[in-house]
Amino acid sequence: MTLDRRQFLKTSAVLGGAVGLGLPAVAEAFTADGVRPLAYRPETGDAQPKPLRILILGGTGFIGPQQVEYALARKHKLTLFNRGKTNAGLFPTVPRIIGDRNMAGGHDGLKQGTWDVVIDNPTRNPAWVRDAGMALKGRVGQYVFVSTISVFSDYSKPGMDENGPLHTPGAEAIWASNDGAAYGPIKVRCELEAKAQFGEDKLTIVRPGLIVGPGDLSDRFSYWPVRIDKGGEILAPGTPNDPVQYVDVHDLSEWIVRTGENHTLGTFNATGPKGPTTIAEMLLGIKSVTTSDARFTWVPAEFLAEQQVRAWSEMPVWQPAMGPTLGFMQVNCQKAYAAGLTFRPLADTARSTLDWYKTRPAVEQEKARAGIAPAKEKAVLAAWHAKKGD
């Protein structure tokens, strides 16, 4: 199945993604770390907030730099806590506490200072949360823990809110595991440690879905802008109406800072876009910021499974809209939307991701961590056409 020009133009206009719909002709520049200028911000209607003392655990990885940029622009007083190794040259004027969270005593540097807000960025070891809580005890006004929607154990039903069923908390023996199957249970345990250390009267738990945009080294979203920009026939997964969810790193990071400004407490699923979006709308919206001749051939989930094409990894930002993954891309985030989570147009995300990707070293561009290999894509498309008798 292919989509014609009329469908393409209609979808692009709906998403605000077509070139010429008021978007800049040239995207803003990015550093190699994915940090963008501050010129573009979602309209929030907020007045200048009261300056806060904010401690960010991390701050130089993927979502951290966006938080730092935004918080500095809003006149907050920042301190970073990290090893001083990842992107060590970022933010040289921001005070930094050096500590290695994997080491005994690695959190000792946090035993001094008082903070209005502490933001704990993607942490997958519950011991880190426990040790940070013990070091910071009694000196934190609000602790924001960045969790994940992977804490849920059942995605078979659409519209799952924050009260959905969770994995059994990960036992201590797997806390340091990098096994993907352990990720959800470990993050459940992290959430429990956060509650135990800081109390629900000081706690904000943010559960993002797929975080996308400049700086994302997983390539889970960037595969699509890069592949579409190359053009030609593109293997598209499932049906055009399969739902997708994702959140731009800037939107998520900026909202996390605002949860501190507004003292927003509680647990929040945090992905988007705000309105239901299909995989076809996403792919066509991405295409609209390129001059590509890309054309999409939709291949059913059952055939992809027969060809051993893996959802999510080889076909990023997609899970079959059926059975156990029916609700994976239909998580209810209305609570976060009501608390001020906003979204920029897909066109901005697609354009900025593609421009940033092209600044990466050639070796990284050639060895993407997600997306189907070109030879395999070609073979699967040939098999699909043969099956249909094309």
Image (cartoon, helix red, strand yellow):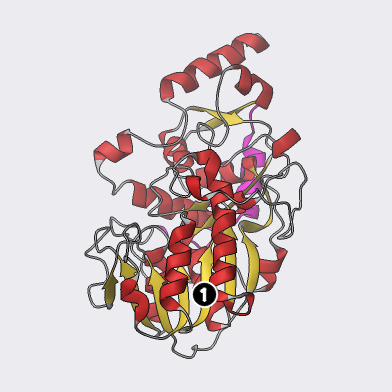
Give the residue number, with chain letter if any, for mark 1: 143
Among the 4 quarters of the image, the one containing residue 189: bottom right
Asked if one can make out residue 262 in the rendered structure from this viewpoint, the answer is: yes
Relative to 47, 163 lies left or right: right
Q: Is residue 86 above or below residue 237?
A: below
The quadrant of the image that shows the N terminus is: top right
- Whether 331 is among the magenta residues is no
Image location of residue 185, percent across then percent down: 58, 48
Q: Residue at 42% x, 40% y: name it.
A: 226
Question: Is residue 158 rendered to the left or right of residue 342?
Answer: right
> x, y (%) of residue 303?
65, 19
Task: Tell me the kind of residue under disc 1.
Answer: Tyr
Residue 22 belongs to magenta span: yes
The magenta region covers: 1-26
Residue 345 appears anywhere in the view: no
Give the x, y percent position of residue 269.
64, 60
